[in-house]
Each structure stands twice: as C-alpha cells, then as structure tokens.
Amino acid sequence: MNSSDSQHTPEIERLGFLLHNIPRLMRKRFEGHGNPHGLSVAQWRLLSWILKGHGATQARLAELLEIEPISVSRLLDRMEEGGWVERRQGVEDRRVRMVVATAKACEAHKEIKKLVGQIYQEALAGIDERQRVALIAALEKMAENLSDGEAPCGSHEKVQEEVVSK
C-alpha cells in the first residue's frame, strides 16, 4: 500500500462534498430567512467584497467572485440603479473605475451581518469553542496549501474572533 492509498479514507472522500455542500446549505438558509433588501446572494457576495476592501475594480471583483467580468458588470448595473454602489474614477489612475459601497449598502450590510451570524450559530451548534478554533485553523491551512502564493482572503485572526465570539 502506498502513502496515497493510506490517506484515502472514507472521511477524506467526503471532504469535497462537505466543502461544497455546507456553503450551499448556508446560502439556502440565508435565502430562506428572506431578503428584506431585495438583493440576490450574488449581489450580497459582491457587496461584501467591496466592503472588505473599501472598494475594488470590476476586474478584481470578477476575479474574487470567479465569474466573468460581463456578469459583474450586469450585477453592478442593477446595484448602481438601486443605490447600493457607485462607480468612481480611480484616484491614482483615472482610467480605472473603482466600485464603492454607498451609505445605504453599509447600513444594510450591518443588518445582514446579524443574519449571517445567526446562520453561523445554527451551523456551529453542538461544536464547542475548541473545535471551532480547530476547524478554522484547519480550513486556513487548507487554503494556504492551495493558494499558490495568492494572498489569503481576509484576516484569519478576524475570522477566528468572529466565529469564536458568536
């Protein structure tokens, strides 16, 4: 038996399914709670990235969301019409269009963070603090192992504090 066979356990076989299914279930729960602001999950994801980075270019948003730039453009068109985002000329390079969140988006984001916190609580029910910290650490290590030198998404300390404190 070679080393790859010894690491191929039933638990490891379930890993891909779990890593795909849990976010799907969380999105479904999010949608099930209703969306008082009328934004789709895709629009909320886009808005979250904008708020995390205090603005971003459309190209960067497409990269982060792993969707085509034209799809980001369409999402942004609808969000701009709704007063959620603005496109502004870049400060350093006027050819660059930065997408920034409006005050309306910032206020709504605070409400949505509460809902997301409730969903995290549901997902983490029955998992003690030590297990939560270990879960986050393991997921961070997996992201690091697969990042190929890309900067990690978000601060691990902040994510850890958010999960543990909820």
Image (cartoon, helix red, strand yellow):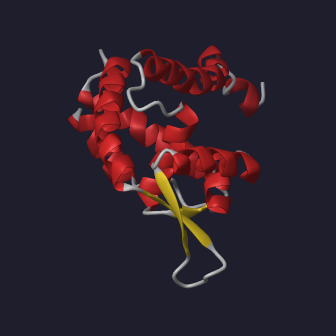
- Residue closest to the eye, 135 or 54: 54
Tell me which corner region of the image, top left, top right, bottom left or bottom right, holds residue 9. top right
The extreme left residue here reads: 165
- Above or below residue 102? Residue 109 is above
| Of 137 and 51, the residue lying toward us | 51
User: Which residue shows up at 27% across the image and 44% down it?
Assistant: 161
Where is residue 6? Give x, y as percent. 69, 25
Q: Picture coordinates of residue 139 (x, y %)?
A: 49, 39
Q: Quadrant of the N terminus?
A: top right
Q: Is residue 52 visible?
A: yes
Say whether residue 154 is visible. no
User: 111 or 126, which lies in front?
Assistant: 111
Indicate whether 110 appears above or below 144. Answer: above
Q: Residue furthest bottom?
A: 92
Q: Position of residue 115 (x, y in %)?
A: 32, 28
139 relative to 149, above or below: above
Q: Position of residue 14 (x, y in %)?
A: 63, 18
Relative to 146, 153 lies left or right: left
Identity of the residue furthest to the front in this view: 81
Looking at the image, which is closer to me, 57 or 9?
57
For residue 134, side relative to residue 128 (left or right) = right
Which residue occupies 61% across, 82% down?
94
Which residue lies at the image location 27% right of the left edge and 31% below the top edge? 130
Question: Quarter of the image holding residue 95?
Answer: bottom right
In the shown orientation, is residue 55 left or right of residue 119? Answer: right
- Total labels: the figure holds 0
Which quarter of the image is occupied by the C terminus?
top left
